[in-house]
Image (tube, coloured by chain):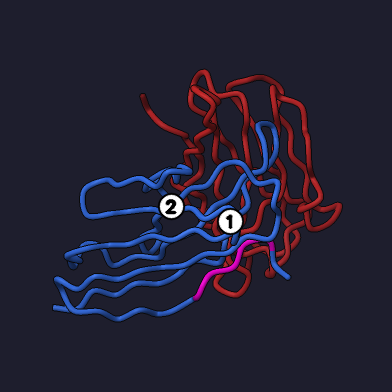
Chain colours: A blue, B red
């Protein structure tokens, strides 16, 4: 089993739709969780950290379920500019490496 | 802040040649990571350093790859000799730890094509 798994998509949604991505991780000792966004031919960029209580940043909401080892990202009122690949990232502890999922590709259509 | 700086941004070379990729992490960051990304394999961690010391190089494909971090502000990834299958985008990233959270930032990448 891979350490971090994601549905590769692609997710094709119309503008204004709500879309949710899921991610599962295998190491129960994982401590830090993130969502990154990667545009075509660009580097991954931090979208948001994921906290135990869940957190929101504008149209983006991240949730963490430690018991199920599951992370989610919800995008409301999707924009054309949200089209990208969304990478789930997990880290066990400080001083250890970040483990990236394979990414989920999103296309928001006009 | 200038962000993570990588050079060159693009490199085209012939099989058998030596390739050296360079990275300057964000000042104050104490971890540095080298990744490789291809369509087939996605983003792969090659090696990472903490306080200039290599911690995990298990992702380095083979002896043709080597990485160094002589000081906190510079790292190199060398491929010698290069092969066509090394063609990929190579990212350098650095991270810092603050407030119980470690955050990682990527450089723009080096696009390597080995002919």
Q: Is residue A49 magenta?
A: no
Picture coordinates of residue B85, whole percent (x, y) = 69, 69
Q: Which mark is residue B73?
A: none
Question: Circle 1 marks a residue in which chain?
Answer: A
Above or below, B77 against A16 in this view is above
Region rendered in magenta: A3-7
Above or below, B15 against B74 in this view is below
Q: Residue at 40% across / 47% down in the picture?
A: A54
Task: Place residue A4 in its image quadrant.
Answer: bottom right
Question: Circle 2 marks a residue in which chain?
Answer: A
Of mark 2 and mark 1, the one earlier in the sequence is 2
Picture coordinates of residue B49, whole percent (x, y) = 70, 33
Look at the image and tell me whether residue B37 can be seen. no
Compute the Cα span from label 2 to label 1. Answer: 9 Å
Look at the image and tell me whether residue B19 can be seen. yes
Q: Are marks 2 and 1 in contact (CB under 8 Å)?
A: yes
Give the left or right position of residue A1, taking residue B99 as reference: right
Picture coordinates of residue B97, whole percent (x, y) = 55, 25
Q: Residue at 50% across / 44% down in the picture?
A: B8
Farthest-out residue, front? A67
Picture coordinates of residue A61, whole percent (x, y) = 32, 54
Element assignment for label 1:
strand
Specify few, some or many for label 2: CA neighbours under 10 Å numbering under 14, 14-19, or 20 or more: some
Residue labelled with disc 2: A36
**Nearer-the-camera pick, B107 or B99:** B99
Q: Which mark is residue A100?
A: 1
**Nearer-the-camera pick, B30 or B11:** B30
């Amino acid at each position: 089993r891979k350490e971090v798994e994601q549905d590769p998509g692609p997710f094709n949604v119309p503008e204004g739709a709500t879309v949710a991505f899921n991610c599962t991780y295998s190491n129960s000792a994982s401590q830090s969780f993130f969502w990154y966004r990667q545009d075509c031919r660009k580097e991954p960029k931090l979208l948001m950290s994921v906290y135990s209580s869940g957190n929101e940043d504008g149209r983006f909401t991240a949730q963490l379920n430690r018991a199920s080892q599951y992370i989610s990202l919800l995008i409301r009122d999707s924009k054309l500019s949200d089209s990208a690949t969304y990478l789930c990232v997990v880290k066990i502890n400080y001083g250890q490496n970040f483990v990236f999922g394979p990414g989920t590709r999103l296309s928001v259509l006009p | 802040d200038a962000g993570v700086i990588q050079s060159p941004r693009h490199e085209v070379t012939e099989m058998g040649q030596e390739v050296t990729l360079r990275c300057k992490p964000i000042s104050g960051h104490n971890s540095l990571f080298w990744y490789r990304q291809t369509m087939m394999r996605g983003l792969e961690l090659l090696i990472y350093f903490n306080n200039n010391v290599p911690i995990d190089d298990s992702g380095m494909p083979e002896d043709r790859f080597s990485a160094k971090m002589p000081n906190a502000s510079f790292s190199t990834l060398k491929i010698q000799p290069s092969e066509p299958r090394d063609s990929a985008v190579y990212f350098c990233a650095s991270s810092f730890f603050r407030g119980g959270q470690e955050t990682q930032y990527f450089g723009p990448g080096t696009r390597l094509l080995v002919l």
